[in-house]
Image (spheres, grey):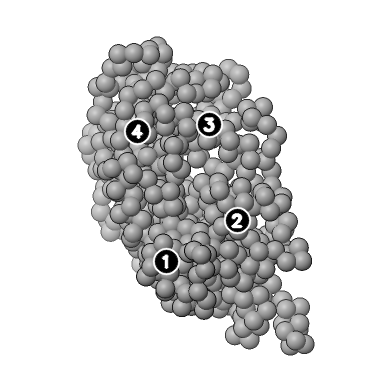
């Protein structure tokens, strides 16, 4: 395929009509390729980014894939390359995009594998677990997905009740449940993963097939939106079920069964819901005893997410090899979205720019005087700050946006890197201890409400007579004003102060005294890594740690990719001659 890179068009030429955009791109591409528009057989946008450095002339920057009529460029790559060489344009190349293909097992291979090891188990139904299960199901295997939280439909209701009443369900909340933590954080799909283009496009295409807006296939910073992601997750679950997969919700992994140094089973907490328990007894072919199921399991993908601290502690007690992992923590800051748009788009013709570009995101980073990094994370245009707690007596926050991102405020985490010397000890779970300590302080500060204060109060370190922000706050869950600076380590206080002032040089007004800070953003990533080998296996044979909770991902897309890769390890094992031969001999 012919690729055209760095095609720049002013946004006002593009406007808001997708069909007009396609027609204009076809015209521009034909001119660059020196052919008639009718000679373009196929045109696809691979990526669209925004260049707003000149606010008077903001540009869309495109990467296009074009297929010409065979009479113009020839029928194959060689003839396309000859055509392109004559153009003498460094931004026009020939590249083949090889799509990711999930191998399909022969029926006898899948049957032999599941006869020997049982159906593969996936613990967790966040993006890692869902894509692992989807990959296994596409291959011809029949995964069983076990999720401690509720199905996404029930989970939405539980989460809304928590926002409205403050009564937490520790097993199903913003962190736990079908869809994972990303379900309530805007559904951002941009990733810093390099060299994985085929995996990234596969993940984006799967989400689009499940109902996400098609623009995620080419936008530089794609997002689904919390409101749409709920439906996308439902549809992905139903596709897995249609391929022979099964789901157990409200069922928590409580222990491993280990025999002769390898995984041989799982101990599961049975759901309290009587109807679900009866359904699962029928599915598993056994009765729950004293609230527990004990099932055979010889191949298990562990996709538990970064907040399953009790499960990680259990794994440590079972002597799984793990280590500390760098992570970051900080605060979340709110500004009026209008302020951000004016700073990054310019005031001239702002309403027209907003109609074309939508609310402006931002990405900020700063190196502090003592060498630490403070940077924006999980920025939510037109969003809300949400109470994302999952443990009684501890409080943490996150950001969330719906698909339209039409809320009044922009918010983002401002997080600071945690150094090895910041950990309380050298224990592998020391990072969790540090997170919990700050979350407990945040909870106590305002009796479980989200602690917040203006940047002006934070900067002056006022401890009484807190002033209410002149900006209208946007929260999901109770919030209250409090001295959040008092709960932070000194290095984090200093980094926030320095960062806020530095960021105001990029976004005028970022350091406004009315900017609203909230605490604590502690769950940016897992502070633990569960070790695994090149085949994806942990120190316990049969157990495959994957995704954010195991320390191998940081976001929806990277977690999904790691789930796919881990599932492919099992599929390769199932397709191996060794497995087939052993089953025949048995």
Q: Nearer the viewer, mark 2 or mark 4?
A: 4
The residue mark sitting in front, 1 or 3, is 3
Counting from the top left corner in percent of width and height, residue 496 is at 47, 22
The residue where tag 3 is placed is 437
Task: Tell me how far mark 1 sits from mark 2, CA to CA.
Answer: 19 Å
Q: Classify mark 4: helix, strand or loop.
A: loop
Q: Is residue 322 left or right of residue 145?
A: right
Q: Earlier in the sequence, mark 1 or mark 2?
A: 1
Checking the image for residue 236, the label placed there is: 1
- Of callouts 3 and 2, the N-terminal one: 3
Label 2: state its secondary structure. Answer: loop
Mark-to-mark CA distance, 1 and 3: 37 Å
Q: Distance of mark 4 from mark 3, alpha carbons? A: 17 Å
Q: Secondary structure at mark 3?
A: helix
Position of residue 174 relative to residue 292, above or below, is: above
Place residue 55 in its image quadrant: top left
Q: Residues within 10 Å of mark 2 (few under 14, many from 20)?
A: many
Q: Which residue in the structure is indicated by mark 2?
A: 546
User: Which mark's residue is nearer the viewer, 4 or 1?
Assistant: 4
Seen in the picture, residue 377 relative to 141 is either above or below; the reply is above
Specify few, some or many for label 3: CA neighbours under 10 Å numbering under 14, 14-19, or 20 or more: few
Q: Are marks 1 and 3 in contact (CB under 8 Å)?
A: no
Label 3 vs label 2: CA separation?
26 Å
């Amino acid at each position: 395929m012919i690729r055209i890179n760095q095609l720049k068009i002013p946004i006002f030429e593009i406007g808001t009509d997708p069909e007009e955009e396609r027609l204009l791109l076809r015209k521009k591409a034909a001119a660059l390729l020196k052919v008639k528009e009718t000679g373009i057989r196929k045109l696809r946008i691979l990526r669209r980014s925004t260049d707003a450095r000149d606010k008077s002339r903001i540009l869309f920057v495109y990467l296009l894939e074009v297929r010409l009529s065979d009479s113009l460029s020839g029928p194959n790559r060689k003839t396309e390359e000859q055509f392109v060489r004559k153009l003498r344009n460094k931004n026009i190349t020939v590249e083949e995009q090889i799509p990711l293909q999930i191998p399909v097992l022969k029926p006898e291979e899948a049957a032999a594998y599941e006869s020997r090891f049982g159906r593969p188990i996936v613990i967790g139904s966040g993006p890692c677990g869902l894509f692992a299960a989807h990959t296994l199901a596409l291959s011809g295997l029949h995964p069983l997905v076990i999720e401690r939280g509720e199905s996404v439909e029930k989970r939405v209701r539980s989460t809304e009740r928590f926002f409205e009443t403050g009564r937490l369900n520790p097993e199903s909340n913003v962190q736990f449940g079908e869809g994972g933590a990303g379900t309530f954080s805007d559904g951002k799909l941009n990733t810093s993963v390099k060299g994985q283009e085929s995996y990234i496009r596969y993940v984006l295409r799967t989400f689009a097939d499940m109902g996400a807006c098609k623009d995620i296939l080419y936008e530089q910073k794609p997002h689904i939106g919390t409101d749409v992601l709920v439906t996308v997750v439902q549809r992905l679950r139903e596709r897995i079920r249609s391929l022979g997969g099964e789901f157990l919700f409200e069922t928590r992994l409580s222990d491993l069964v280990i025999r002769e140094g390898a995984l041989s089973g799982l101990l599961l907490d049975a759901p309290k819901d009587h109807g679900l328990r009866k359904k699962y007894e029928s599915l598993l072919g056994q009765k729950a005893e004293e609230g527990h199921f004990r099932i055979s399991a010889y191949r298990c993908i562990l996709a538990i997410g970064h907040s399953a601290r009790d499960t990680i502690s259990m794994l440590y007690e079972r002597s799984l090899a793990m280590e500390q992992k760098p992570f970051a923590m900080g605060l979340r800051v709110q500004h009026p979205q209008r302020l951000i748009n004016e700073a990054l788009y310019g005031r001239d013709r702002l309403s027209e720019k907003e109609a074309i570009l939508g609310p402006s995101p931002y990405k900020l980073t700063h190196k502090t005087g003592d060498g630490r990094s403070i940077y924006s994370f999980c920025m939510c245009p037109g969003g809300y700050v949400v109470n994302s707690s999952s443990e009684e007596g501890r409080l943490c926050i996150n950001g969330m946006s719906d698909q339209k991102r039409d809320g009044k405020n922009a918010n983002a985490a401002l997080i600071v890197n945690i150094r090895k010397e910041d950990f309380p000890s050298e224990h592998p779970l020391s990072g969790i201890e540090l997170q919990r300590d700050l979350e407990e302080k945040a909870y106590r500060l305002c009796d479980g409400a989200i602690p917040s204060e203006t940047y002006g109060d934070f900067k002056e370190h006022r401890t009484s007579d807190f002033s209410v922000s002149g900006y209208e706050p946007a929260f999901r869950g109770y919030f209250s004003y409090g001295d959040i600076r008092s709960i932070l380590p000194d290095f984090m206080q200093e980094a926030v102060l320095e960062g806020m002032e530095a960021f105001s040089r990029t976004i005028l007004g970022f350091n406004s005294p009315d900017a609203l800070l909230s605490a604590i953003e502690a769950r940016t990533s897992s502070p633990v890594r569960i070790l695994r080998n090149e085949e994806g296996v942990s120190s316990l044979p049969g157990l495959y740690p994957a995704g954010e909770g195991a320390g191998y991902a940081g976001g929806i897309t990277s977690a999904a990719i790691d789930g796919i890769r881990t599932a492919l390890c099992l599929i390769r094992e199932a397709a191996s001659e060794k497995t087939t031969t052993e089953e025949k001999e048995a």
